[in-house]
Image (cartoon, helix red, strand yellow):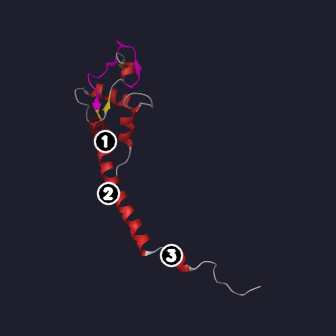
Amino acid sequence: MSDDTRPDTDPIETTPSRRRVLTLGAVGAAAVVSIRPALAQTAGSVLNCDIPVPDAGRAGSFIDAQGKIVPSGTKGAFAGASRPFKGEEVRRVLNSGGQLPGTDSERSRAYVNYIRRLQRGQGGFTCFASLQMPRG
């Protein structure tokens, strides 16, 4: 038995060299430089994405006050929007209130309720989900 408590490895061998540290720093900086513009572009594209009300698969259906799809002609329900809404328009209404463009307050409320009920696979869902992502 030996009283020697030295580690088996030389501490100089496990310490990264100055060149290695500088290389890792440069790689990290390059990643930040390339990711930031991509995030900015993503934020911009989210605001320009479209949310159809209703989506193409349900075109011709009406939207009731709760945002549910109902048969066309249902009393108290609204015809679909004449054009898709941009992500920026929807974000503004969700965050600050107001109305979607080209709608009165009741129709806008019904459309916003429809948008809030969107699920995966429906047109506009990805755009709406992107609007919910926090930005930093």
Q: Distance between the residues labelled 3 and 2?
A: 28 Å
Residue 132: image x %, image y %?
A: 38, 42
Instruction: Tell whether position 65 is magenta.
Output: yes
Eyeballing the image, is 120 above or below 60?
A: below
Closer mark to the observer between disc 1 and disc 3: 3
For marks 2 and 1, the one nearer the N-term is 2
Q: Is mark 2 on a helix, strand or loop?
A: helix
Q: Mark 3 points at which residue?
A: 15
Q: Which residue lies furthest to the bottom in this view?
A: 3
Residue 78: image x %, image y %?
A: 32, 19
Segment tinted magenta in the rendering:
64-85
Pointer 3 local density, CA inside 10 Å: few below 14, some 14–19, many at least 20? few
For marks 3 and 2, the one nearer the N-term is 3
- Give the number of the disc on residue 60: none
**Magenta residues, dominant SS class:** loop
Residue type at mark 2 is Val
Closer mark to the observer between disc 2 and disc 1: 2
Which quadrant holds residue 80?
top left
Residue at 52% across, 79% down: 12
For the residue pair 114 and 56, the one nearer the viewer reads as 56
Residue type at mark 1 is Asn
Q: How far apart are marks 1 and 3 (CA)?
A: 51 Å
Which quadrant holds residue 124?
top left
Eyeballing the image, is 45 above or below 9?
A: above
Q: Mark 1 points at which residue?
A: 95
Closer mark to the observer between disc 3 and disc 2: 3
Residue at 32% across, 57% down: 33
